[in-house]
Image (cartoon, grey):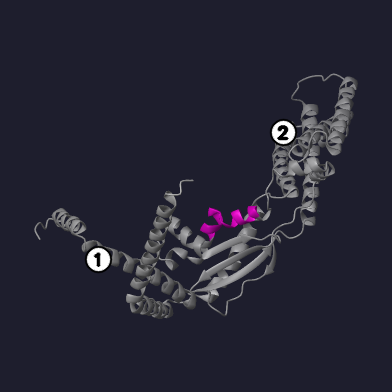
């Protein structure tokens, strides 16, 4: 290292240190010169904000908590758990928190529009359009799901009684919505077989009408042709019911599941039995639209309707075992204390914000004053003032 550079480097370091010290002292001097403004200005703004906070009407928040429906573990879920780590990876594709689904339903347009009509929120919020009323409602009603599985509804309003009514109404409207939707496995099966039962009932009525219009006397029901086709009709109906049942099971079971394989085996056995019955059945004589064919069709839809009815009743029983759809933990009651405005917090924030703004303004003002003392900078500032006045149509000095 060159020894001649050492004194110069030391001198530069001393100058830089002295410059930094002078700069900090200048900043401190600016603060001290404006200390009264920096102290009393924020305090005055805080007192003003505190006075305004007393004028603002208070807002009350009512809280309600409920436990969403707890789904029973299905056979498919049991199979996934039996796989250990692989089952966990397969289950990870679902919702991270089951409560998220019910939070989304509470925020849905269907529930919000029902609340708007029920409480006449267009008039209450002084809005002309539903879209604006939904935004206000969304800001006044906060819905959140916790890790404990409970869903919390916080409804805010100027009227503490109405706040409690609004929170409880959200749970009521969600319950009505879930009554129309199929969420759990049992509900999905109930809706599916209810639809199939309705279709089979309509077809049964048509077949019964066609049988009555054949003109055959009721005593013919006891003859051998009817007895011969009755077993085949019931067997065909059972096969149709089993096929529809398999189609329904594909929605929540894999084809390798034991229950699914058993249902396939039963269907195969019934098809074999039907093939044997057709081989033993004597060939039909006469018009294909005769009494025998109509009676066979009637018995087919009659058996099909009975099978769908049994499946529907079983699904309803499974649905009832799942317990109540919504279990309310805490009913919203009119709050005794207001939730906002928080006067102390508002005052403190205004004091801090005003102090920060005034401090920046003092530094800028001092820098502008110092810059005006230099001839070169003063000339630039003069040209800037002229350009500013010219831009606003006020030329001259």
Residue at the spot of label 2: 210
Which SS class for mark 1? helix
Q: Over which residues does the magenta segment extend?
A: 100-114
The picture places residue 35, in percent across and down from the top left corner, at 35, 77
Residue at the spot of label 1: 369
Q: Residue at x 57, y 70 (%)?
A: 165
Report the number of numbered marks.
2
- Judge from the rendering whether residue 316 lies leftward or rightward of residue 23; answer left or right: right
- Judge from the rendering whether residue 275 lies leftward or rightward of residue 353; answer left or right: right
- Judge from the rendering whether residue 61 lies leftward or rightward of residue 267; answer left or right: left
Neighbours of disc 2 within 10 Å: few (<14), some (14-19), many (20+): some
The quadrant the C terminus occupies is: bottom left
Q: Earlier in the sequence, mark 2 or mark 1?
A: 2
Q: Residue at x 42, y 74 (%)?
A: 351
The picture places residue 270, in percent across and down from the top left corner, at 87, 30
Q: Is residue 94 above or below residue 168?
A: above
Which SS class for mark 2? helix
Is residue 230 visible to us here?
no
């Amino acid at each position: 290292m060159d020894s001649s550079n050492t004194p110069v480097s030391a001198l530069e370091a001393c100058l830089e240190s002295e410059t930094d010290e002078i700069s900090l002292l200048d900043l401190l001097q600016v603060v001290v010169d404006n200390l009264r403004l920096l102290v009393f200005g924020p305090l005055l703004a805080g007192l003003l904000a505190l006075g305004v906070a007393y004028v603002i009407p208070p807002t009350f928040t009512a809280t309600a908590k409920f436990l969403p429906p707890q789904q029973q573990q299905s056979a498919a879920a049991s199979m996934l758990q039996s796989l250990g780590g692989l089952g966990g990876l397969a289950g990870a594709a679902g919702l991270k928190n089951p409560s998220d689904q019910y939070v989304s339903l509470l925020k849905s347009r269907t529930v919000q529009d029902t609340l708007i009509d029920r409480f006449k929120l267009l008039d209450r919020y002084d809005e002309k359009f539903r879209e604006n009323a939904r935004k206000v409602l969304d800001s006044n009603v906060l819905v959140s799901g916790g890790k404990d599985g409970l869903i919390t509804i916080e409804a805010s309003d100027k009227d503490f009684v109405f706040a409690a009514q609004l929170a409880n109404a959200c749970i009521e409207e969600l319950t009505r919505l879930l009554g129309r939707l199929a969420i759990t496995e049992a509900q999905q099966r109930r809706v599916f077989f209810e639809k199939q039962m309705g279709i089979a009932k309509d077809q049964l009525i048509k077949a019964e009408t066609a049988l009555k219009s054949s003109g055959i006397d009721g005593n013919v029901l006891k003859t051998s042709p009817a007895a011969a086709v009755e077993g085949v009709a019931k067997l065909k109906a059972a096969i149709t019911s089993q096929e529809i049942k398999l189609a329904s099971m594909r929605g929540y079971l894999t084809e390798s599941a034991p229950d699914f394989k058993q249902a396939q085996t039963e269907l195969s056995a019934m098809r074999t039995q039907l093939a044997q019955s057709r081989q033993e059945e004597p060939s039909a004589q006469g018009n294909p639209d005769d009494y025998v064919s109509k009676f066979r069709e009637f018995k087919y839809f009659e058996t099909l309707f009975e099978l769908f009815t049994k499946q529907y009743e079983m699904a309803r029983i499974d649905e009832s075992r799942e317990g109540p759809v919504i279990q309310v933990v805490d009913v919203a009651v009119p709050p005794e204390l207001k939730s906002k405005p928080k006067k102390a917090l508002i005052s403190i924030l205004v004091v801090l914000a005003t102090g920060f703004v005034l401090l920046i303004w003092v530094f800028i003002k001092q820098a502008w004053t110092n810059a005006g003392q230099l001839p070169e900078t003063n000339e630039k500032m003069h040209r800037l003032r002229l350009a500013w006045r010219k831009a606003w149509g006020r030329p001259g000095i």
